[in-house]
Image (cartoon, rainbow, N blue to C red):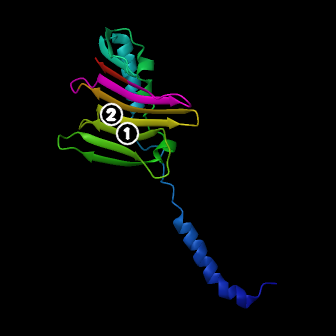
């Protein structure tokens, strides 16, 4: 049998502890199924793949690997779905991913819109950082991102840049700078630059 005096003495303390514990929990942000993402990067990239596959434009592409001299070619034979897949990795428009980031949106002096995603403390997403620049009417202009993956046998870091022609909104250039390393091997540095 619980002593009524003891219960009366400790009830306020137990209630205080319970309130303190629940107050420390971080409430989940409400997710609306109808909420529009700030920008649908994946849709833009998929549309660009369709356009580029249809047009097959000439591309000036430079590749540097390790200490080897840079190789530059001009070609219209590019598999665009594979070529732009790395940029699709930077798409964050899923609620399970967005909870790992703080987002900051602001209007730049030239009227363009800057959207930055920076990972929150203790989060370990592949996309470390994403910065989008959109036109005043929210058309794609530029992307910068940093991707990092690591496990006991593999490490990869890639810095991405993608730009669009302001007149057409279509991709005009891109760059991928990276380093990758397998366990017990040297790091391989590489860079890809392409201009359409």
Q: Residue furthest bottom?
A: 5
Residue 20 on image: x %, y % = 55, 72
Question: Could you say where residue 8 lies in the image, as x and y percent from the top left?
Answer: 68, 87
For disc 2, the marked residue is 143
The tag on residue 120 is none
For the point 36% across and 37% down, which residue is it?
Answer: 39
Residue 188 pos. (x, y %):
45, 26
Do the numbered discs 2 and 1 sit on residues whose CB atoms are within 8 Å? yes
Looking at marks 2 and 1 on the same chain, the residue that comes earlier in the sequence is marked by: 1
Q: What element carries label 2?
A: strand
135 is higher (above) or lower (below) than 190: below
Look at 49% across and 48% down and name the residue there.
123
Looking at the image, which residue sits at the far left?
A: 110
> Is 165 located above or below residue 31 in the figure?
above
Q: Position of residue 136 (x, y in %)?
A: 23, 38
Residue ID for mark 1: 130
Per the rendered image, the range of residues in magenta is 166-190
Q: Nearer the viewer, residue 51 or 193?
A: 193
């Amino acid at each position: 049998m619980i002593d009524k005096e003891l219960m009366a003495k400790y009830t306020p303390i137990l209630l205080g502890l319970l309130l303190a514990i629940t107050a420390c929990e971080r409430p989940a942000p409400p997710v609306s199924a109808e909420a529009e993402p700030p920008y649908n990067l994946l849709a833009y990239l998929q549309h660009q793949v369709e356009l580029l596959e249809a047009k097959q434009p000439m591309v000036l592409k430079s590749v540097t690997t390790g200490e080897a001299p840079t190789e530059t070619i001009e070609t219209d034979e590019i598999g665009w779905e594979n070529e732009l897949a790395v940029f699709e990795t930077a798409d964050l428009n899923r609620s399970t991913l967005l909870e790992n980031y703080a987002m900051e949106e602001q209007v730049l002096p030239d009227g363009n819109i800057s959207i930055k995603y920076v990972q929150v403390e203790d989060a370990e997403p592949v996309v470390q950082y994403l910065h989008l620049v959109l036109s005043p009417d929210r058309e794609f202009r530029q992307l910068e991102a940093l991707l990092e993956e690591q496990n006991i046998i593999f490490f990869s870091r890639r810095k991405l840049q993608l730009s669009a022609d302001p007149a057409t909104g279509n991709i005009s250039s891109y760059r991928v700078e990276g380093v990758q390393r397998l366990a017990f091997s040297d790091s391989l540095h590489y860079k890809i630059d392409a201009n359409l």
